[in-house]
Image: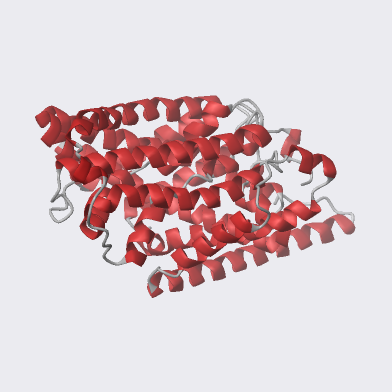
Amino acid sequence: MRDDRIGGLTLVRGIGLLGAALVVLNSVVGAGIFALPSEVAVRAGALSPWLFLACGLLVITIVLAWAELASYFRDSGGPVLYAGTAFGPLAGFTSGWLYFLSRMTAFAANANVLVIYLATMWSPLEGGFGRGVAIVAICGALVVANYLGVRDGVRTVGLLTVLKLAPLLLLVALGLPHVGGDVLLPDALAIADPGGTTLLLIYAYVGFEAATITAGETARPRRDLPRALLATVAATAALYFLIVLVYVAVLPGGGEARATLVDLGRELAGPAGAAAITAAAIFSIGGNLASNMLTVPRLTYALAEQRLLPAWFARVHPRFRTPGNSIVFLGVLATLFAVTGSFFWLAAASSLTRLIVYGLCIAALPVIRRRADAEARARAFRLRGGPVIPVVALALCAWVAFQSEPAAWRMTGLLLVGGLLLFALAARAARAREATRASGHPPGRS
């Protein structure tokens, strides 16, 4: 990557191992854990906790491949760097732009969900003007926290992590005494709709890759990112297992009744338990939003650094040393989508686009291995077993992706076409700038 950044400014490497782990945790543990237990329980019953654990082990193959990819790079961008380095600018742009759209729409969707939970505590937020003001306030607060410095963004994520994990861990502690041998080792092994169930379970773990996007602001990315990815996803799998184990033990018919973790909290600790889990849901979604606001602007920043988007996106604030323009761009765009609700047409394809990005980056791994110099290979986090783990991870991505509905594939096709058009426009602008420079005239702003 060229080191001709706008104004000669670079991002501050203010994220350590703990910060990287917090980004991973909050990107994975968002709104899903508060809805998925009932969805999986209705299909698999008492087998549900073990399915969460098994799928966590499968996802580890994808995480391992990304851990090695992360160990070769020090710059921000994640999928932009991996696909672009292996397959060229078009692949890098397409991967990064699709991933940006997926995360931006997820941010908008979760902002709406957060306001819905807040409205249960204060009715004026249920709709209309109150809902709009709440969305603008949430997005605006996160923009300001991240604009002022990466350390402030990490502190916000860290505070929300504590606030959301404490009630969940208390729920596990109160519920474990209710777990008997029949729940821990169930007799029934039937799973209704295995493909759809696996799709739900895999989606519970997506988001781990967010920490790779902020590699340019991570103090020791080659060392810390692989550790943060593996340790945090493994811990998340254990947390999911324990929560769902308690769920099926305390609420054996919870799946059919579509009971939530709020119902579980009420069963274990009365109204106070329900209130605590409601608060945990709010902080969990808030943490997910904070993590998105910390990581997603680095995608457009990385695309602009590689001259695949206008240089405006790569400008670093001279005082705060953050990608301020990219942060504001995400905040404004996500706020508009969240307030108007027009993000729903993208939501159907958001998960599928992420799986495509996973697959594209895993396919890039052998190419990056081969092109790396001896020093980079010596520093890298190398997978054992040769191509076995990447092949298993790639097959898993392909199998899960083909469980998606045809409508999601059509929407993904539209997103890909849109990405190609944007890439063509960026390439045309780059050629125009080069022609202007060659003619001897001062180049215009990009």
Residue drawn at (60%, 68%) of the image: 421
Q: Position of residue 183 (x, y in %)?
A: 21, 45
Q: Is residue 373 left or right of residue 398?
A: right
- Any part of residue 283 in sight: yes
- Any part of residue 149 in sight: no
Q: Position of residue 324 (x, y in %)?
A: 57, 36
Relative vertical location of residue 395 with respect to residue 48 in this rendering, above or below: below
Front residue (pair 315, 32)? 32
Q: Position of residue 374 (x, y in %)?
A: 84, 43
Q: Quadrant of residue 349?
A: bottom left
Front residue (pair 339, 368)? 368
* Numbered circles on residues, count: 0
Q: Is residue 87 left or right of residue 249?
A: right
Front residue (pair 175, 304)? 175
Residue drawn at (53%, 39%) of the image: 230
Residue drawn at (24%, 60%) of the image: 43
Q: Is residue 183 left or right of residue 408?
A: left
Residue drawn at (31%, 44%) of the image: 33
Front residue (pair 373, 423)? 373
Relative vertical location of residue 239 with respect to residue 38 in this rendering, above or below: above
Look at the image and name its color scheme: secondary structure
Q: Quadrant of residue 282?
A: top left
Q: Position of residue 371 (x, y in %)?
A: 80, 53
